[in-house]
Amino acid sequence: MSKKPLILGIESSCDETAASIITENKQGNPVVLSNIISSQIKIHKKFGGVVPELAARSHVDKIDLIVEKAVKESGKQIQELDAVASTAGPGLIVCLSVGLSFGKALASSLRKPFIAVNHLEGHALSPKINSELNYPYLVLLISGGHSQFLSVQGLGKYKRLGTTIDDALGEAFDKTAKLLGIEFPGGPQIEVLAKKGNPNKYNLPKPIFYKGGCNLSFAGLKTAILKITKDIKTQEEKFDLAASFQKTIEEILYKKTRIAFDAFEKINKLQKKTFVVAGGVAANNSIRSMLINLCKEKNYQSIFPPIEYCGDNAAMIAMVGLEKFKTKQFSDLDFPAKPRWPLDKDAIFLKGAGVKL
Ligand code: KG4
Ligand code: ZN
């Protein structure tokens, strides 16, 4: 039997330093041998958000230990690696540079191929770690930095159907949490508080609900919430606002996902349709159940990565590395860090004032 590929994945695009080793079983399905994540939440908490220079310094401090731990936990020797894959973008350039340089240096010293990975491709392919998933499929990627609907036609082949024209969904959760006095990153706490409140108490705006196809917008919500929080006095009112926010987000996603289904079906004629939800916000259970129900209604198979692969991790980077290794898509050692690296290079830039929908 030929040796199965053994790939190291490294992730340092934002505030998680992560390394993972992945291989395949006899059937050709991915097997994660180790998945180490070191979060910097403690460092950034007091600033209410990620401070790039501090994040980069912490990546530099930890990267070798994290990689060493990933190798040790995998039960393999570093010399056994077949390739090293690092996130090269999008993300904070000072952070990306750390994992990228480390990965290149390691690959070069081992005389093994280096593979540059797009972080968004990592999220989009993350369910492949645990589920059988055939191309094409529709993905809703909802994280702290991105919110988009993509038709995944194949490895490296993406058609963006919709994107946020302002804030990312995770950002909207975190900003709402901050306005409610919840510590960074407050997104997951909103879900908890929402369960205790009345979702119909506050009528929040739904920007571009009736236009813009399956593009998304969340900035108007933040402004509305800012106004409301000024008059909030009781804990109950806080719960009600969290519940109203959660409900509004679900209504927006329900409507926009239906539109995305239509757009996906226009370009893919399929018997079996699959909808994947990935990224940090995919960990939100209320959003999950709402989308699972929608999939039942519209005859889609729904796939969510397990919670540990929703947020930033290196297993998803190693996963893309594995796919690229098998198709010999290697990168040169001068591959640059790319703060902006859209998956669909033909999609028009849809951010900022004056965007026409
Ligand atoms: O994918 P991720 O770890 O990092 C990025 O690539 O951005 O996503 C992090 C985002 C944060 O904004 C966090 O608040 C949000 O995901 N998040 C959640 C939940 N868990 C994480 N938002 C809502 N509900 C959750 N349960
Ligand atoms: Zn991410």
Image: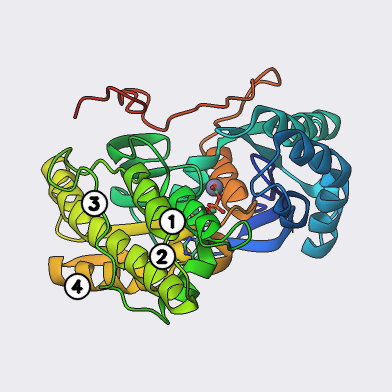
In 3D space, how far apart are the residues under numbered discs 3 and 4 (Cα atoms)? Answer: 25 Å
Camera-nearest label, 3 or 4:
3
Which residue is at a point 20% across and 68% down the rendered structure image? 294
The reply to whether residue 238 is visible in this rendering is yes
Disc 4 marks which amino acid?
A: Lys
C-beta proximity under 8 Å, tags 2 and 1: yes
Q: Identify the residue at horizontal 80%, vertical 48% (top origin).
A: 80
Residue shown at the point (83%, 35%) measured from the top left: 110
Circle 1 is placed at which residue position? 278
Q: CA distance from mark 1 to mark 3?
A: 22 Å
Q: Earlier in the sequence, mark 1 or mark 3?
A: 3
Q: In the rendered view, does 58 fall on the left or right side of 321?
A: right
State the CA–CA distance, disc 2 to disc 4: 14 Å
Q: Amino acid at mark 2?
A: Phe
Single out the residue that lies furthest toward the bottom.
196
Judged left or right of residue 188, residue 112 is right
* Quarter residue 251 falls in: bottom left
Task: Provide residue 55's location: percent of width, then percent of height.
Answer: 75, 41
Which sits earlier in the primary sequence, circle 1 or circle 4?
1
Query: Is 209 left, or right, of 166 in this rendering?
Result: left
Q: In 3D space, how far apart are the residues under numbered discs 1 and 4 (Cα atoms)?
A: 18 Å
Q: Is residue 346 above or below residue 143?
A: above
Tell which of 271 and 36 is nearer to you.
36
Q: Between label 1 and label 3, give the one nearer the viewer.
A: 3
* Residue under numbered circle 2: 304
Q: Residues within 10 Å of mark 1 (few under 14, many from 20)?
A: many
**Residue carrying label 3:** 206
